[in-house]
Image: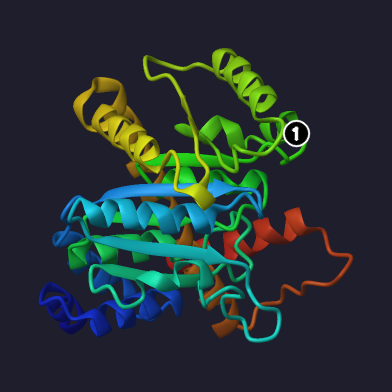
Amino acid sequence: MHQLVEQIKEKNIRALARAITMVENDHPEKLAMLSDVFSLKKHAQYVGLTGSPGAGKSSLVNRLITHIRSEGKTVAVVAVDPTSPFSGGALLGDRVRMNEHFTDEGVYIRSMATRGSLGGLARATKDAVRICDAYGFDVVIVETVGVGQSELDIMKIVDTTALVLTPNSGDVLQIFKAGIMEIADLFVINKADLPGYGKLKALLKELVMMTAKGDQETQIVKTITTENKGIDKLWEKINAHHDFLYHTAEGKERRQFQQELEVYELVREEIWLDVKEYMEQNNTDITIEADSDPYQLAQEIFKKWKGDKHD
């Protein structure tokens, strides 16, 4: 077993941090280490919060941590932030809204930069979640940056996806068109004390009826984080959805589909890294210029790489 994984097994928090850094930096030993990490899987509950910037996701996560800790459970938070154009690091890495939990040994908060990932999720996010699971956290929360349609990537990471909206979030139909609403297992209307709550809830109910799939109805929860209202109800609904996933045939099918997506994604990533390394190490006669036909060049590169691999 990898040395870092041995240390994670012994609850070494620094080893946990180093392992996540290793996957972020795409270390050559990454896959071997992650295979060992997977063998320690403890089946933590994975929860995702996504939504537009300003919806109050961080404040909501802060309240959720407090509630979950009151039940005696440990919590890890993987917060995916925009990338600083200057440092390449997480722009909101200080996680100001969660600072009250920094001294709690039962809480681990890690910011990860998107580093250009279109989905608002760092490429290494799922690996980080798995590492937190192997460490032994009971609940792992993924908070995403909330940037648009590519936010669909969150469904590949977590068990339960909560979409956070606010009464002043603008035209919900536009969010619906972007495809984000289709991945929500749960809708959270945060800042529900603002004008427009009733109108937003009615619209969401209508959209839920239009997109209903299977037996599990998408729930709508009202929260006001400034007054700590609705957090217990939100956690109750998250747990209910988790039970559905692990105790019904439909839930099992969803988890199977999620696993298939992950395997294919890993294969695709390894192929790309191999092709990139081949191009860098071999002086090919293929030149990529500004006005080159990208489709033709992609085919030529793939054929050369594939041909050399089978020679």
The N terminus appears in which quarter of the rendering? bottom left
The one nearer the camera, 148 or 101, is 101
Residue 104, image x and y in percent?
27, 73
Q: Give the answer, above or below, for where 241 lies relative to 88.
A: above
Q: Is residue 53 left or right of residue 125?
A: right
Please state which of residues 20 and 49 is positioned toward the viewer in this rendering: 49
Q: Is residue 224 above or below residue 37?
A: above
Tell me: residue 290, above or below residue 212: below
Colour mapping: rainbow
Count of numbered marks? 1
Furthest toward the front, the residue is: 227
Left or right of residue 39, residue 286 in this image: right
Q: Quadrant of residue 127?
A: bottom left
- Against 190, residue 92 (above or below) is below
Amino acid marked by disc 1: Gln
> Which residue lies most toward the right here?
291
For this view, does 127 lie left or right of residue 42? right
Residue 298 in sight: yes
Q: Residue at x 66, y 54 (%)?
A: 54
The residue nearer to you, when weighing 298 against 54, is 54
Residue at point 32%, 70% (across, down): 108
x and y, in percent, of residue 96 in the image: 52, 72
Q: Which residue is mark 1?
A: 174
Residue 187 rendering spot, x and y as whole percentages: 51, 33
- For image coordinates 59% across by 59% down, the residue present is 303
Q: Secondary structure at mark 1?
A: helix
Provide residue 299's location: percent of width, then percent of height: 66, 56
Quarter of the image for residue 173 reads top right
